[in-house]
Amino acid sequence: MMDLLQIFLNESFWVASLRIATPLIFGVLGALLCERAGVLNLGIEGIFVVGAMVGWMTVYAGAPLWIGVLAAAGGGALFGLLHAILTVPLGLSQHVSGLGITLFATSTASFLYRTILPDVSSPPRIKAFQPMDVPILSDIPFLGPVVFQQTAMTWLALIMVGVVWWVINRTPLGVAIQAVGDNPDAVNAQGLSVYKLRIGAVMAGSALMALGGAFLTMSAFDAFFFGMVNGRGWICIALVIFASWRPGKALLGALLFGMFDAFQVRLQTEAGAVIPSQIFLMAPYVLSIVALVFVARKAEYPRALLQPWFKGHR
Amino acid sequence: MMMIEPRGGISKRMQMAIPVIAAFVALALAALPLAFAGAPIFPAYWEMFNGVFGSMFSFTEMLTRATPLIFTGLAAALAFKARLWNIGAEGQLYLGAMGAVAVGTGLVDGPAILMIPLVMLAGAGAGAAGMLGPAILKTRFGADEVVTSLLLNFIILIFVQMMLEGPLKDPMSMGWPQSEPILDNAALPRLSDVLPSQITIMDRMRIHSGLIVALIAAVVAQIALSKTTWGFKIRAVGENAAAARHAGIGVNRTLLGVACISGALAGLAGVSEVAGLKGYLTTDLSPGYGYSGIVVAMLAGLSPIGVVIAALYVASVFVGADSMSRAMGVSSFLADLVVSLSLISVLVGGFFARYRIRFTGKAGSPS
């Protein structure tokens, strides 16, 4: 029992929690933005892969890290645009289109990686983002290392929580995005373009998703592996329901998830002898399903989610 | 100003033409990645074609590849017809394979005429259970089955790993995580063993009787869907659940039933791979047949007979691209690219069949 307590008191546990949460924060924010505008984006899993590959490859080709981050976001936005075209003006099934985007984005990223680097046996590495060392602040006991010894991308994720919250709740654009996800007819009646708002939100959301992928190859690790995203995108789709489409709760959900994951890794080293390690590996996915079941009944989905809207007919 | 107008209706011929056009568009679009990889375009296409239709052997390899795709394609098509989003066929495939291995490797023994149905039943049952879970979570708690069935894929694969390191592990495998081999009298026979000996050309070919089972499943599904009240209920629930409920159809019961059938079909894909082709279970049994099944179902327009044709196409792309990539040094991810492009093309094609885009003179013209 003491051992369990020790885990929580150790600051490395909290550093790990925030690190594990970072890609999920990007992903949940991205999914939230799309869904608030009324578009489910199941392309998320593939867009993570694109972000991971494009960001890494840009830096590997010699560009600075932040250009890599931008390139990843751009790549994500591009696949977001494709999903938006298919689901908004064409009004196709958001489920099927999203799955198509995931398959297309994953195979595009994998094909490009293999074609550009055909004969590498072990994945080449880049010099990834390093933990920041902020003078004075990093020396604050406990809080210092946990918050200030993260990489710049974790900071970016935390800043984006504020930015997305501010845009959605405090700007006319945010009001319009919410309205287009609840009642597109009303938005149209006000003379705003339903298409432009939805397409824009899906592109911005997809760019955020891609940053989650970029974090994996440019901050958490320093190389690209096939299959490294490993369901993180799908977990974000569950978390966004858990977060009732609110940025603050999205941060909370991602952090809880990160804590749980960091905890199970540590528990594994303690109890690994008695319990098969696979039980721990399953835990994050099981947790996502359980969380979803608990909130599902009272989840207040954006009212026009999954509803195609065509100009000129109702 | 762009306006989107619905067309009167889609002709049967149009409905058939769209997937064919989409398939060719996707293949044509593959010229781009081929050029990017520096491969000579036309020889590459020829190599792809030749890799499937060049010899009897490669053709049967394609049929072998199509077998699990017919099962997973049917699994997706039936579920989608009822608007039940079963994205978990990959996991259900592994559950099916585990079910087959659990009973087919020595737990029970008997003549083939008993063992083969038993192995198939075990696999189908395990697969059905795999989709019944998400369906119950949907009908009881309103939990989105897309997310739950997707996440289950990951859980099940880790579970398979655990079983292969534990109870299902073959003690003779030198530490390799694989199951014991399926007994000879529980295995689906190779076609070369059951077909008349005149067709000696079938020798050393891997094609097995799982294909026959898959074709029977497709025909049964087609009849069930179009000719029975059960099929009518599925279509009614899929088209408008509220109206179906109003008409006295047990919507939840129908959804749970479809979930079981869909899961069972995906489970049979696993049985057919493990008991027909590989002989034992490993964690790389399926290169994503569950996910490709979704593409197959969409290309087929959710029609069971269409699934067979679409599965042949997707299998041809995989086998052809594999052979081309070996010959030309192009990454075999090209196959996945073509398959995903086919899905997107068929979606767009379906749109243009249902709607026409009209350009009007100025913005805000009365509608």
Image (spheres, helix red, strand yellow):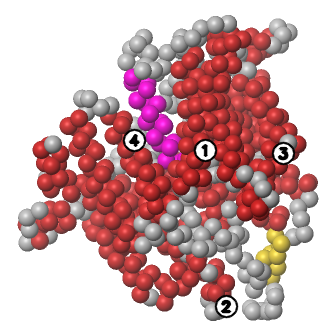
Packing grade of label 1 (10 A; few <14, some 14-19, many >=20) is many
Residue, disc 2: A189
Residue, disc 4: A282
The Cα–Cα distance between marks 3 and 1, rounded to whole angstroms, is 29 Å
Residue B94, by quadrant, is: top right
Provide residue A35's location: percent of width, then percent of height: 53, 70
Residue, disc 1: B291
What's the residue type where badge 4 is placed? Answer: Met
A7 relative to A258 in the view: left or right: left
Q: Chain of mark 3?
A: B
Provide residue B145's location: percent of width, then percent of height: 57, 52
Provide residue B346's location: percent of width, then percent of height: 74, 56
Residue, disc 3: B229
B115 relative to A110 in the view: left or right: right
In magenta, the rendered stretch is B149-166
Judged by its main secondary structure, the magenta piece is helix
Q: Secondary structure at mark 1?
A: helix
**Mark whose residue sits in front, 2 or 3:** 3
* Image quadrant where one finds the C terminus of chain B: bottom right
What's the residue type where badge 1 is placed? Answer: Tyr
